[in-house]
Amino acid sequence: VSASFAMLGDIIIAEPDALIGFAGQRVIKQTVGVDLPKGFQRAEFLLDHGLIDMIVDRSDMQQTVGDLMKFFLKTD
């Protein structure tokens, strides 16, 4: 997902515990030659490191996206 249009959005939302990455952990570990941090490529790790903007449960996604659209499309 991280090598696609998904990361080009103005607001990036993930579901809890989502796995987000271009290559798998094993491939990355073999490439860089170091152990990866716990939770690497999980939504919570990426949120903590500023790569996504929010984590929203699927059951709340429609409401959250609607609220964001109302906010950003507000006209006076």
Image: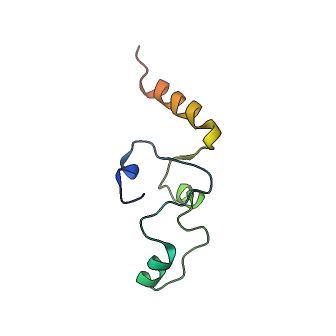
User: Residue 56: x, y in percent?
Assistant: 60, 43
The quadrant in which residue 37 appears is: bottom right
Residue beneath the point at 52% across and 64% down? 41
The quadrant in which residue 72 appears is: top left
Q: Total label count?
A: 0
Quadrant in which the N terminus appears = bottom left
- How was the colour assigned to the protein in this rendering? rainbow
Residue beneath the point at 40% across and 50% down? 6
User: Residue 54: x, y in percent?
Assistant: 55, 46
Q: Locate residue 38 relative to residue 49 in the image: left or right.
A: right
Quadrant in which the C terminus appears = top left
Q: Locate residue 13 relative to residue 1 in the image: left or right.
A: right
For this rendering, which residue is in front, 32 or 59?
A: 59
The quadrant in which residue 31 appears is: bottom left
Q: Is residue 28 above or below residue 46?
A: below
User: Residue 62: x, y in percent?
Assistant: 56, 33
User: Residue 75: x, y in percent?
Assistant: 40, 17
Give the farthest residue toward the top: 76
Q: In this view, does 12 lie above or below 2?
A: above
